[in-house]
Image (cartoon, grey):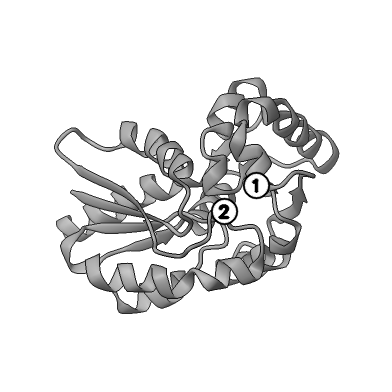
Amino acid sequence: MNLLIINPNISAATNARIRDIAEPLVSPQDVLEVVSADSGVELIETVDQSASTVLAVLAMVTARHSEVDAIVIAAFSDPGLQEAQRITSCPVIGISEAAMKTAAKTANRFTIITLGSELGQAIKKNAHTYGVSDQLVDIKILPWTVAQVSADPKAHQSAFADACQRAVTEDGVGAVIIGGGPLSGIADAIADDLPVPVLDGVRCAVEMALMSAQKQVSA
């Protein structure tokens, strides 16, 4: 299987974190590519920045979809996802889409912990598009920029863990999503300390991509 993960921002550190999550999930004979779109945005934090990456994402999808078995778009706003799904011959999965659908199957109620206050409404809109808005209890935006957390994720892990615990205690959720490509790895780092599943969008998307590709092969 050939899996292409498109990171809509141009952060090399984000690419490395995405690869760290994805690589253990694929077989040794599989081909995994993690590449940035030519978006010119270092880290996506606003709706406008997310929108500015769509053309670059779609250009890469158009150029590569016939060469691969599945594509993952690895930004939590899922830029260009619906358009990409309409033009490809292979499954295209967004990390927000995958995380929300996985959470909805895992629990009756879930919360998203993320960064970027301007992206909250876009995430809610996506939840409605994916048919899970009734199960999404809250989107909790932590008070740091993506750049700050990306520069030192370990220093912020306890804050994410505390936010997850509050979601469980105060909102009664059965699953929590840590949302964002640059945040890849935080969910895995704190999962053992929490009483409910803590979902990483990249992990969910890669697992969904692998399943989708296998279904196409067996069809």
Asked if the residue at tag 2 contacts the one at tag 1, i.e. Cβ–Cβ closer than 8 Å, the answer is yes
Q: CA distance from mark 1 to mark 2?
A: 7 Å
Residue depicted at x 65% and y 68%? 47
Q: Earlier in the sequence, mark 1 or mark 2?
A: 2
Residue with the mark numbered 2 = 43
Q: Secondary structure at mark 2?
A: loop
Residue depicted at x 62% and y 64%? 127
On the question of residue 70 being in view, the answer is yes
In this view, the residue in front, 47 or 93, is 47
> Where, by quadrant of the figure, is residue 4 drawn?
bottom left
Q: In this image, 20 relative to 60: left or right?
A: right
Q: Is residue 6 above or below residue 62?
A: above
Local packing at callout 1 (Cα closer than 10 Å; few below 14, some 14-19, many 20+) is many
Q: Position of residue 178 (x, y in %)?
A: 62, 42
Residue depicted at x 33% and y 73%? 59
Q: Secondary structure at mark 1?
A: helix
Which disc, if any, is residue 146? 1
On the question of residue 112 being in view, the answer is no
